[in-house]
Image: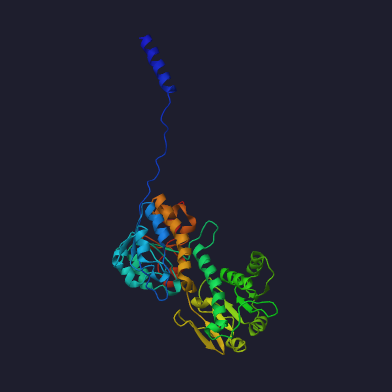
Amino acid sequence: MEHKKDAIRALAQEAALLPKEELLAVGKKNKALTIGIPKETSLQEKRVALVPEAVALLVGRGHEVIVEADAGKEANFDTRDYSEAGAQIVYSPQDVFRSSMIMKVAPPSFEEVKMMPGKQTLLSALQLTVQPVDSLKMLMAKKISAIAWDYFKDDTQIYPVVRAMGEIAGNTSVLVAAEHLSNANDGQGLMFGGISGVKPTEVVILGAGTVGEFAARAAIGLGASVKMFDNNVYKLRRVQNDLSTRLWTSTIEPTELKKAIVSADVVIGALRAPLGRTPCVVTSEMVSEMKHGSVIVDISIDQGGCFETSRVTTHANPTFTEYGVVHYCVPNVASRVSRTASYALSNIFAPIIVSMGDVGGFTESIKRNKGLCEGVYLYRGTLTNEIIGEAFSLPWKPLDLLFPGM
């Protein structure tokens, strides 16, 4: 009996010393997503959320992408480009809006929301000032989860899409001003910038944010003389440091502002308000004393504009003249260069979608990505954004209450 116990003990010791298979944690299985890209129907919206190269990336990762025919036409992407990238092309918006995830640039209209069966994920702009409350209520009733691309943050705590569109708007504002100073658009025949022996163009920029910074970069690069105004001294200092040059800067003091504007060839309005209307800092009287043929480019027009003489124009009819001063007041300037803007959007959206699929879907993604949480304003029909709740007098609940421990 004792002999058997010794034999069993010896076998147990031998088994303990044998190599064993490594025990690994079982990872969460990737989730294949169905992503719909509808054709934009909003006035003047020419951008598309994903370019063909991004579609090819997502299809290669096992996701299904459904694209409405001509969705990229206004950004000069052919439907065949999307088809060759692996997208499924459909000819009815209803077929797109049945996808589990909808990606749009502009917010969905009421009619587009009606096409959605429900319990889907929506990624689009929020644009609170033009968001129809009926559309919002229907999204809630249909248990939609929605992310506003103009509110989510990246790892550096900036708004990546807002930043990218601001860079485009700043550069484009200078190109627009150059067009309207030249003979090409019945301007004064001035070249934007300067050459040896000729006085450089004088440019005044209102606002030291991203738009103002990139407008200054472009103007200085062309040889213009730049003056910048903003009431945030930190922003003025940051722009000077980032541009590595000494700008003429000032806080927005009416007397100093008027002197700068009266002698300017170009004035670019790039002020932003955190909420509500942009402050109107340039009066009609100031504009009336500007040089004949000078140019105003009001990038702030989508928040009401910072010139008293501004009124909304379109890409088809972009300018009007007041007091002999050319005014360019087109909202959504990025759509003027829709192909570049679409690439900028797609470069931000595509990695987010890839990550979302890798971790198992929308819910897992927002649990892990704090920056993405900043943009969530609906979760399965529950309003999670305080600003929207107060603006429309709707009940809301913080997202962290829906996911304790986030």
- Color scheme of the displayed model: rainbow
Q: In this view, does 350 lie to the left or right of 169?
A: left
Q: Quadrant of the N terminus?
A: top left
Q: Where does the image place residue 241, in percent across and percent down from the top left?
A: 66, 65
Q: Is residue 143 left or right of residue 46?
A: left
* Front residue of this view, candidates 326 and 188: 188
* Front residue of this view, candidates 242 and 359: 242
Q: Where does the image place residue 404, in percent across and percent down from the top left?
A: 44, 52
Residue at 39% from the left image edge and 40% from the top image edge:
26
* Front residue of this view, candidates 64 and 140: 64
Tag count: 0
- Name the quadrant containing residue 217: bottom right
Residue 406 appears in the picture as rendered: no
The relative height of residue 141 versus residue 331 in the rendered view (above or below) is above
The relative height of residue 167 versus residue 314 in the rendered view (above or below) is above
Q: Where does the image place residue 400, in percent across and percent down from the top left?
A: 45, 56
Residue at 40% from the left image edge and 19% from the top image edge:
12
